[in-house]
Image: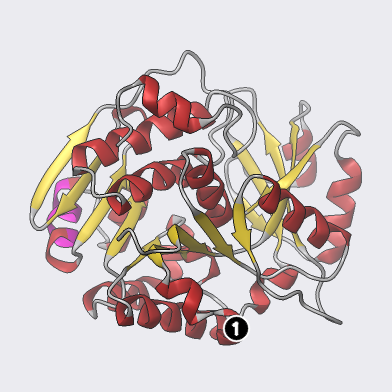
Amino acid sequence: MSDSRFDVLTIGNAIVDVIAPLTPGFLEAEGMSEGIMHLIDTDRAAYLYDKMPPDKHQISGGSAANTAAGVASLGGRAAFVGKVAADPLGDVFETDLKSIGVHYGTSRLLNGALTARSMIFLSPDGERTMNTYLGACHQLTEADIKEDEIGGANVTYMEGFLWDPQEAKKAFVLAAHYAHKHEKAAAFTLSDPFCVDRFRDEFLDLIRSKTIDYVFANVHELKSLYQTDDLGEAVREIAKDAELAAITMGSEGAMVVHNGEVVSVPAFPVEKVEDATGAGDLFASGFLLAISRGQSMESALKTGCLAASEVISHIGARPVVELETLVEAHGLAG
Protein backbone atom coordinates (compact mmCIF):
# COMPACT_ATOMS: atom_id res chain seq x y z
CA MET A 1 0.00 0.00 0.00
CA SER A 2 3.02 2.28 -0.04
CA ASP A 3 2.07 3.63 -3.48
CA SER A 4 -1.14 5.12 -2.11
CA ARG A 5 -1.69 8.87 -2.04
CA PHE A 6 -3.79 8.77 1.14
CA ASP A 7 -4.04 6.41 4.09
CA VAL A 8 -7.71 7.23 4.65
CA LEU A 9 -10.21 9.23 2.58
CA THR A 10 -13.56 10.04 4.15
CA ILE A 11 -16.84 11.14 2.56
CA GLY A 12 -19.69 12.80 4.42
CA ASN A 13 -21.55 15.89 5.51
CA ALA A 14 -19.44 19.05 5.45
CA ILE A 15 -20.73 20.95 8.48
CA VAL A 16 -19.45 23.82 10.59
CA ASP A 17 -19.91 22.92 14.26
CA VAL A 18 -20.96 25.70 16.62
CA ILE A 19 -20.50 24.53 20.22
CA ALA A 20 -21.61 26.05 23.53
CA PRO A 21 -22.55 24.84 27.04
CA LEU A 22 -26.21 24.52 27.99
CA THR A 23 -27.87 26.99 30.32
CA PRO A 24 -30.39 25.63 32.85
CA GLY A 25 -33.88 25.12 31.40
CA PHE A 26 -32.84 25.85 27.82
CA LEU A 27 -33.73 22.43 26.37
CA GLU A 28 -37.16 22.44 27.96
CA ALA A 29 -37.89 26.00 26.83
CA GLU A 30 -36.90 25.17 23.25
CA GLY A 31 -38.68 21.79 23.14
CA MET A 32 -35.52 19.74 22.63
CA SER A 33 -34.72 16.22 23.83
CA GLU A 34 -31.30 15.83 25.41
CA GLY A 35 -28.79 13.80 23.44
CA ILE A 36 -30.83 13.80 20.23
CA MET A 37 -29.92 15.27 16.86
CA HIS A 38 -32.68 17.58 15.61
CA LEU A 39 -32.81 18.45 11.93
CA ILE A 40 -33.75 22.11 11.47
CA ASP A 41 -34.46 24.59 8.68
CA THR A 42 -32.72 27.84 7.81
CA ASP A 43 -34.89 30.03 10.05
CA ARG A 44 -34.45 27.77 13.07
CA ALA A 45 -30.69 27.64 12.44
CA ALA A 46 -30.48 31.44 12.50
CA TYR A 47 -32.64 31.64 15.64
CA LEU A 48 -30.57 29.12 17.62
CA TYR A 49 -27.29 30.62 16.43
CA ASP A 50 -28.39 33.96 17.87
CA LYS A 51 -29.30 32.25 21.15
CA MET A 52 -25.76 30.94 21.62
CA PRO A 53 -23.24 32.94 23.69
CA PRO A 54 -20.68 35.23 22.02
CA ASP A 55 -17.79 32.94 22.99
CA LYS A 56 -19.25 29.94 21.13
CA HIS A 57 -16.65 27.73 19.42
CA GLN A 58 -16.78 27.33 15.60
CA ILE A 59 -14.88 24.62 13.75
CA SER A 60 -15.23 22.49 10.65
CA GLY A 61 -17.19 19.40 11.56
CA GLY A 62 -19.30 16.52 10.40
CA SER A 63 -18.69 12.91 11.36
CA ALA A 64 -16.47 11.88 8.45
CA ALA A 65 -14.59 15.20 8.49
CA ASN A 66 -13.81 14.62 12.17
CA THR A 67 -12.45 11.20 11.27
CA ALA A 68 -10.21 12.72 8.59
CA ALA A 69 -8.98 15.30 11.10
CA GLY A 70 -8.13 12.52 13.54
CA VAL A 71 -6.18 10.63 10.89
CA ALA A 72 -4.14 13.76 10.20
CA SER A 73 -3.48 14.27 13.92
CA LEU A 74 -2.26 10.68 14.10
CA GLY A 75 0.30 11.46 11.41
CA GLY A 76 -1.64 9.86 8.60
CA ARG A 77 -2.34 11.13 5.09
CA ALA A 78 -5.99 12.14 5.16
CA ALA A 79 -8.49 13.42 2.61
CA PHE A 80 -12.12 14.51 2.83
CA VAL A 81 -14.90 14.79 0.25
CA GLY A 82 -17.97 16.84 1.16
CA LYS A 83 -19.97 19.80 -0.16
CA VAL A 84 -19.99 23.38 1.14
CA ALA A 85 -21.37 26.54 -0.43
CA ALA A 86 -19.47 29.51 -1.79
CA ASP A 87 -20.14 31.52 1.37
CA PRO A 88 -18.28 32.64 4.53
CA LEU A 89 -18.91 29.44 6.50
CA GLY A 90 -17.73 27.48 3.47
CA ASP A 91 -14.49 29.45 3.71
CA VAL A 92 -14.26 28.57 7.41
CA PHE A 93 -14.72 24.88 6.64
CA GLU A 94 -12.16 24.68 3.83
CA THR A 95 -9.52 26.80 5.55
CA ASP A 96 -9.85 24.84 8.77
CA LEU A 97 -9.48 21.41 7.17
CA LYS A 98 -6.50 22.43 5.08
CA SER A 99 -4.82 24.06 8.09
CA ILE A 100 -4.71 20.72 9.91
CA GLY A 101 -3.29 18.85 6.92
CA VAL A 102 -6.41 17.27 5.42
CA HIS A 103 -6.61 17.28 1.62
CA TYR A 104 -9.88 18.91 0.55
CA GLY A 105 -10.70 19.65 -3.08
CA THR A 106 -14.47 19.35 -3.46
CA SER A 107 -15.95 22.10 -5.65
CA ARG A 108 -18.22 24.69 -3.97
CA LEU A 109 -21.98 24.80 -4.43
CA LEU A 110 -23.00 27.97 -6.30
CA ASN A 111 -26.38 29.72 -6.18
CA GLY A 112 -27.98 27.18 -3.87
CA ALA A 113 -28.30 26.24 -0.21
CA LEU A 114 -25.98 27.69 2.43
CA THR A 115 -23.11 25.82 4.06
CA ALA A 116 -24.41 23.37 6.65
CA ARG A 117 -24.01 24.12 10.33
CA SER A 118 -24.76 22.29 13.58
CA MET A 119 -25.51 24.03 16.86
CA ILE A 120 -24.28 21.71 19.61
CA PHE A 121 -25.42 22.30 23.20
CA LEU A 122 -23.34 20.53 25.85
CA SER A 123 -24.83 19.21 29.09
CA PRO A 124 -22.69 19.16 32.29
CA ASP A 125 -22.21 15.38 31.92
CA GLY A 126 -20.80 15.74 28.40
CA GLU A 127 -23.94 14.74 26.51
CA ARG A 128 -24.56 16.73 23.35
CA THR A 129 -27.84 17.91 21.88
CA MET A 130 -27.42 18.73 18.22
CA ASN A 131 -29.48 21.01 15.99
CA THR A 132 -28.36 20.53 12.42
CA TYR A 133 -29.10 22.49 9.26
CA LEU A 134 -27.89 20.35 6.37
CA GLY A 135 -27.99 22.88 3.55
CA ALA A 136 -25.28 22.48 0.93
CA CYS A 137 -23.78 19.25 2.28
CA HIS A 138 -26.73 17.25 0.93
CA GLN A 139 -25.91 18.39 -2.60
CA LEU A 140 -23.00 15.95 -3.00
CA THR A 141 -23.20 14.12 -6.35
CA GLU A 142 -21.27 11.60 -8.42
CA ALA A 143 -19.49 14.55 -10.06
CA ASP A 144 -17.73 15.17 -6.73
CA ILE A 145 -16.30 11.65 -6.60
CA LYS A 146 -12.88 11.63 -8.26
CA GLU A 147 -11.43 8.28 -9.23
CA ASP A 148 -7.85 9.43 -8.71
CA GLU A 149 -8.64 10.43 -5.10
CA ILE A 150 -10.61 7.29 -4.21
CA GLY A 151 -8.23 4.97 -6.02
CA GLY A 152 -5.31 6.63 -4.25
CA ALA A 153 -6.63 5.93 -0.74
CA ASN A 154 -5.97 2.72 1.19
CA VAL A 155 -9.45 2.97 2.71
CA THR A 156 -12.47 5.06 1.71
CA TYR A 157 -14.80 5.63 4.67
CA MET A 158 -18.35 7.01 4.34
CA GLU A 159 -20.92 8.14 6.90
CA GLY A 160 -24.49 6.89 7.17
CA PHE A 161 -25.68 10.41 7.99
CA LEU A 162 -25.33 11.22 4.28
CA TRP A 163 -27.32 8.19 3.13
CA ASP A 164 -30.48 10.15 2.44
CA PRO A 165 -30.34 12.28 -0.74
CA GLN A 166 -30.64 10.13 -3.85
CA GLU A 167 -27.63 11.72 -5.54
CA ALA A 168 -25.48 11.19 -2.47
CA LYS A 169 -26.38 7.48 -2.48
CA LYS A 170 -25.17 7.25 -6.06
CA ALA A 171 -21.97 9.02 -5.02
CA PHE A 172 -21.40 6.47 -2.23
CA VAL A 173 -21.82 3.51 -4.56
CA LEU A 174 -19.54 5.08 -7.15
CA ALA A 175 -16.88 5.69 -4.50
CA ALA A 176 -17.06 2.06 -3.40
CA HIS A 177 -16.78 0.99 -7.05
CA TYR A 178 -13.64 3.08 -7.54
CA ALA A 179 -12.13 1.73 -4.33
CA HIS A 180 -12.67 -1.86 -5.40
CA LYS A 181 -11.49 -1.12 -8.95
CA HIS A 182 -8.17 -0.07 -7.45
CA GLU A 183 -8.17 -3.02 -5.01
CA LYS A 184 -8.75 -0.84 -1.97
CA ALA A 185 -11.29 -1.14 0.85
CA ALA A 186 -14.64 0.64 1.19
CA ALA A 187 -16.00 1.28 4.68
CA PHE A 188 -18.96 3.03 6.25
CA THR A 189 -20.41 3.86 9.63
CA LEU A 190 -24.03 3.30 10.59
CA SER A 191 -23.82 6.76 12.24
CA ASP A 192 -26.97 6.72 14.39
CA PRO A 193 -29.84 4.36 15.36
CA PHE A 194 -32.19 6.81 13.64
CA CYS A 195 -30.29 6.28 10.37
CA VAL A 196 -30.46 2.53 10.83
CA ASP A 197 -34.20 2.59 11.47
CA ARG A 198 -34.77 4.55 8.27
CA PHE A 199 -32.40 2.67 6.00
CA ARG A 200 -32.03 -0.78 7.57
CA ASP A 201 -32.73 -2.76 4.39
CA GLU A 202 -30.48 -0.54 2.29
CA PHE A 203 -27.64 -0.70 4.80
CA LEU A 204 -27.91 -4.49 4.97
CA ASP A 205 -27.87 -4.66 1.19
CA LEU A 206 -24.70 -2.53 1.06
CA ILE A 207 -23.03 -4.97 3.44
CA ARG A 208 -24.36 -8.23 2.03
CA SER A 209 -23.70 -7.22 -1.58
CA LYS A 210 -20.04 -6.53 -0.58
CA THR A 211 -20.37 -2.94 -1.79
CA ILE A 212 -19.02 -2.17 1.69
CA ASP A 213 -16.13 -4.15 3.20
CA TYR A 214 -15.81 -2.64 6.68
CA VAL A 215 -18.70 -1.61 8.95
CA PHE A 216 -18.43 0.71 11.97
CA ALA A 217 -21.16 0.87 14.61
CA ASN A 218 -21.82 1.34 18.29
CA VAL A 219 -23.76 -1.23 20.28
CA HIS A 220 -27.11 0.54 19.85
CA GLU A 221 -26.70 0.87 16.09
CA LEU A 222 -25.67 -2.74 15.66
CA LYS A 223 -28.61 -4.02 17.69
CA SER A 224 -30.93 -1.80 15.67
CA LEU A 225 -29.52 -3.12 12.40
CA TYR A 226 -30.52 -6.67 13.32
CA GLN A 227 -33.56 -5.69 15.38
CA THR A 228 -32.44 -7.47 18.53
CA ASP A 229 -31.74 -6.57 22.16
CA ASP A 230 -29.07 -9.28 22.33
CA LEU A 231 -25.59 -7.97 21.48
CA GLY A 232 -24.27 -11.49 21.06
CA GLU A 233 -26.89 -12.22 18.44
CA ALA A 234 -26.13 -8.98 16.60
CA VAL A 235 -22.41 -9.80 16.61
CA ARG A 236 -23.07 -13.26 15.20
CA GLU A 237 -25.18 -11.75 12.43
CA ILE A 238 -22.67 -9.08 11.42
CA ALA A 239 -19.97 -11.76 11.40
CA LYS A 240 -21.95 -13.55 8.66
CA ASP A 241 -22.54 -10.42 6.61
CA ALA A 242 -19.41 -8.26 6.78
CA GLU A 243 -15.74 -8.88 6.13
CA LEU A 244 -14.96 -6.69 9.13
CA ALA A 245 -17.09 -4.92 11.74
CA ALA A 246 -15.66 -2.56 14.35
CA ILE A 247 -18.02 -2.04 17.28
CA THR A 248 -17.62 0.60 19.99
CA MET A 249 -18.97 -0.15 23.47
CA GLY A 250 -18.47 3.13 25.33
CA SER A 251 -16.81 2.71 28.70
CA GLU A 252 -16.45 -1.03 28.01
CA GLY A 253 -14.08 -0.49 25.09
CA ALA A 254 -14.45 -1.87 21.58
CA MET A 255 -14.44 -5.07 19.58
CA VAL A 256 -13.77 -6.11 16.03
CA VAL A 257 -15.33 -9.04 14.21
CA HIS A 258 -13.06 -10.15 11.38
CA ASN A 259 -13.32 -13.36 9.37
CA GLY A 260 -15.54 -14.84 12.08
CA GLU A 261 -13.15 -14.06 14.93
CA VAL A 262 -13.86 -11.55 17.70
CA VAL A 263 -11.15 -9.42 19.33
CA SER A 264 -11.97 -6.93 22.08
CA VAL A 265 -10.03 -4.39 24.16
CA PRO A 266 -11.00 -2.27 27.19
CA ALA A 267 -11.45 1.48 27.04
CA PHE A 268 -8.63 3.78 28.10
CA PRO A 269 -9.49 5.43 31.45
CA VAL A 270 -10.66 9.04 31.37
CA GLU A 271 -10.78 11.15 34.52
CA LYS A 272 -13.95 12.93 33.39
CA VAL A 273 -16.01 12.82 30.22
CA GLU A 274 -16.30 16.47 29.21
CA ASP A 275 -17.92 16.03 25.81
CA ALA A 276 -18.89 12.80 24.05
CA THR A 277 -18.98 14.55 20.67
CA GLY A 278 -16.75 12.80 18.16
CA ALA A 279 -15.88 9.70 20.20
CA GLY A 280 -16.96 7.30 17.46
CA ASP A 281 -15.44 9.50 14.77
CA LEU A 282 -12.04 9.50 16.43
CA PHE A 283 -12.21 5.78 17.18
CA ALA A 284 -12.61 5.31 13.44
CA SER A 285 -9.57 7.54 12.83
CA GLY A 286 -7.30 5.37 14.93
CA PHE A 287 -8.70 2.06 13.77
CA LEU A 288 -8.68 2.90 10.06
CA LEU A 289 -5.17 4.34 10.06
CA ALA A 290 -3.80 1.33 11.94
CA ILE A 291 -5.31 -1.24 9.58
CA SER A 292 -4.35 0.82 6.53
CA ARG A 293 -0.77 0.48 7.77
CA GLY A 294 -1.08 -3.27 8.27
CA GLN A 295 -1.23 -3.34 12.07
CA SER A 296 -3.01 -6.08 14.00
CA MET A 297 -6.69 -5.91 14.88
CA GLU A 298 -5.82 -5.57 18.57
CA SER A 299 -3.47 -2.68 17.86
CA ALA A 300 -6.09 -1.02 15.66
CA LEU A 301 -8.71 -1.29 18.42
CA LYS A 302 -6.33 0.14 21.00
CA THR A 303 -5.37 3.04 18.74
CA GLY A 304 -9.04 3.76 18.10
CA CYS A 305 -9.92 3.66 21.80
CA LEU A 306 -6.97 5.87 22.70
CA ALA A 307 -7.98 8.49 20.12
CA ALA A 308 -11.56 8.38 21.42
CA SER A 309 -10.39 8.78 25.02
CA GLU A 310 -8.53 11.98 24.12
CA VAL A 311 -11.47 13.62 22.38
CA ILE A 312 -14.00 12.93 25.14
CA SER A 313 -11.71 14.48 27.77
CA HIS A 314 -12.39 18.03 26.51
CA ILE A 315 -15.03 20.06 24.71
CA GLY A 316 -15.08 19.66 20.93
CA ALA A 317 -14.95 16.80 18.44
CA ARG A 318 -11.33 17.32 17.39
CA PRO A 319 -8.14 16.40 19.29
CA VAL A 320 -6.39 19.19 21.17
CA VAL A 321 -3.07 17.34 21.38
CA GLU A 322 -1.16 15.63 18.59
CA LEU A 323 -2.56 12.11 18.61
CA GLU A 324 0.59 10.80 16.93
CA THR A 325 2.60 11.72 20.03
CA LEU A 326 -0.02 10.20 22.33
CA VAL A 327 -0.06 6.94 20.38
CA GLU A 328 3.73 6.74 20.40
CA ALA A 329 3.74 7.23 24.17
CA HIS A 330 1.50 4.17 24.50
CA GLY A 331 3.71 2.08 22.22
CA LEU A 332 1.06 1.77 19.51
CA ALA A 333 2.83 3.49 16.59
CA GLY A 334 3.91 1.33 13.74
Residue type at tag 1: Thr
Residue at numbered disc 1: 141
Rendered image quadrant of residue 43: bottom right
Tell which of 166 and 306 is nearer to you. Answer: 306
Q: Is residue 233 magenta?
A: yes
Quadrant in which the C terminus is drawn: top left
Q: Which residues are magenta?
A: 232-238
Task: Give the left or right position of residue 261, taking residue 255 as reference.
Answer: left
The image position of residue 280, as x and y in percent, is 44, 44
Q: Is residue 254 visible?
A: no
Give the main secondary structure, helix, strand or loop, of the magenta stretch. helix
Q: Residue furthest front?
A: 3
Answer left or right for 57 relative to 53: left
Assess disc 1: are there few (<14), some (14-19) or many (≥20) residues with their C-alpha within 10 Å of its C-alpha: some
Instruction: Confirm whether residue 156 shows in the render.
Output: yes
Q: Is residue 318 above or below residue 289?
A: above
Q: Nearer the viewer, residue 160 or 302?
A: 302
Query: In the image, what residue occupies the spot 36% across and 50% down?
Result: 288
Give above or below for 110 relative to 47: below
Where is residue 283 shown, x and y percent of the image? 41, 41
- In the rendered image, the vertical position of residue 30 relative to residue 179, given as above or below: above
Residue in front for this viewpoint, 14 or 124: 14
Q: Is residue 163 left or right of residue 327?
A: right
User: Residue at (47%, 41%) from the top-left corner?
Assistant: 75
Q: Secondary structure at mark 1?
A: loop
The spot of residue 99 in percent (x, y) is 70, 47
Query: x, y percentage for residue 84?
Result: 73, 68
Taking depth in this image into account, of 125 and 298 the one nearest to the observer is: 298
Q: Is residue 207 left or right of residue 221?
A: left
